[in-house]
Image (cartoon, rainbow, N blue to C red):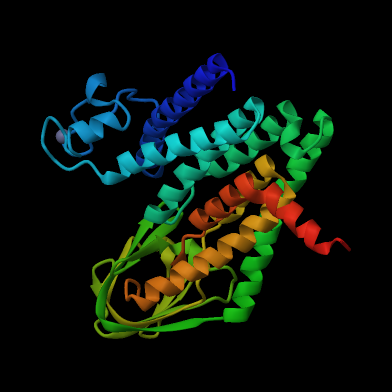
Amino acid sequence: MDSTLAAYDLLFSIVAFVLGATVGSFLNVCIYRLPLHLSVNEPSRSFCPSCKKQIPWHQNLPLLSWLYLRGRCANCGSRIALRYFVVELITALLFLAVWRSFPWEIAIAYWLLISLLIVATFIDFEHFIIPDEITLGGAAAGVAASFIIPELMGTEQRWIALLWSIGSAVLGYGLLWVVLEAGKLAFGKKKIRLEAATPFTWTRTGDDADFVVGEERGLWSDHFAREKDQLLLHCNESRIDGRDFGPATLRFHYNRVAVAGEELQLDGINTITGVVRELQIPREAMGRGALKFLAAIGAFLGWRAVLFSVFAGSLLGSIVGIGAMLIGKRVWSAKLPFGPYLAAGSLGWMFYGEALLRWYIGQLGPD
Ligand SMILES: [Zn+2]
């Protein structure tokens, strides 16, 4: 390569990396604020989550500041999670990899998708949800991007790309919906005997409730799919809105609880607490967010990516899940954060999908 060209090549690569680190810094803000329903642009300046002091720009340089301050707030000295550094680094490296692998207009669309994947992954791991801003917003962005850059769908016709993109989003949603429903039929209900009696809380949050057993937390609605689904808690202690029911079995439907011959509507209840020794859940639950998330992936990457992401994501999720059980990190879980595995699967497709497809077609060929 000509030395001027080489210099430009290096320069653009550095720009892609620095841009990635800067975007990563903004993604950290989204990861922290979106699940708490805080605005991502108000206040516009970052603040320390511990002492709430605004962080001046020179202490807010992506990657460098975290290293320079050795992961502590300059004002109060409290730890700043390693996650901030990791997110900036991953974003920077992926932005660089995308820039070097794809034509520039496709690279820009992929940068957007990568940002969505990273935010979804880190929020899902921590909160077991993927916000609609990411999933539905992402699907809309993917459809728009495919219209503007039809090459994303492997065509030059805008309207055809638009249809492919929408079709792939629908396929993503529908496919996971089928997987989810089939899983319920296959696994049915699940009985969990806890090693030691464990405190639990059920706390109303608007139309839904937070349901926490020991370290496991999740949304109440994610446990129920059908009218007749039941969730049983065999308790050593139980209290409903301060009323003591002592040792009892709480038999829940999605909207009511039966205890000691009484039936109470959950609508009229704010908190249920107690100590549980055994529980029976309708099944392992996958959040509905994953369905919408796969729709977003489909809108950007097309229908083949949808199939591949589900396949690779399930495989990866099972390996990690079994591994976690083997090393005893997880005794039971009612929740599967599927988002991160879908994200990993779709990244795999983004970089290696074409090559994989060519290899596969080569295998099928007669010579
Ligand atoms: Zn601080």
Question: Residue at point 69% right, 60% down?
Answer: 175
Is residue 37 visible in the rendered image? The answer is no
Q: Quadrant of the N terminus?
A: top right
In x, y percent, where is residue 37? 39, 40
Residue extending furthest toward the top: 4
**Residue at image point 23% right, 35% down:** 67
Judge left or right: residue 78 versus residue 283: left
119 left or right, relative to 188? left
The answer to which image quadrant residue 138 occupies is top right
Does 331 sit left or right of 230 as displayed?
left
Left or right? Give the position of 142 relative to 168.
left
Residue 29, quarter of the rendered image: top left
Residue 23 position within the rendered picture, expressed as x and y whole percent measured from the top left: 43, 30
The image position of residue 154, as x and y in percent, is 78, 38
The location of residue 84, given as percent across then percent down, is: 31, 40
Residue 275 falls in image quadrant? bottom left
Is residue 361 visible in this depiction of the protein? yes
Residue in the picture at 29% in, 28% down: 46
Image: 140 above or below 83: above
Closest to the observer: 110 or 260? 110
Ligand 1: quadrant of the figure: top left
Residue at point 20% right, 39% down? 71
Q: Residue furthest right?
A: 366
Furthest-left residue in this view:
76
Q: Which quadrant is the C terminus positioned in?
A: bottom right
Total labels: the figure holds 0
Q: In front here: 187 or 155? A: 155
In front: 227, or 217? 217
Q: Classify 312 as above or below 214.
A: above
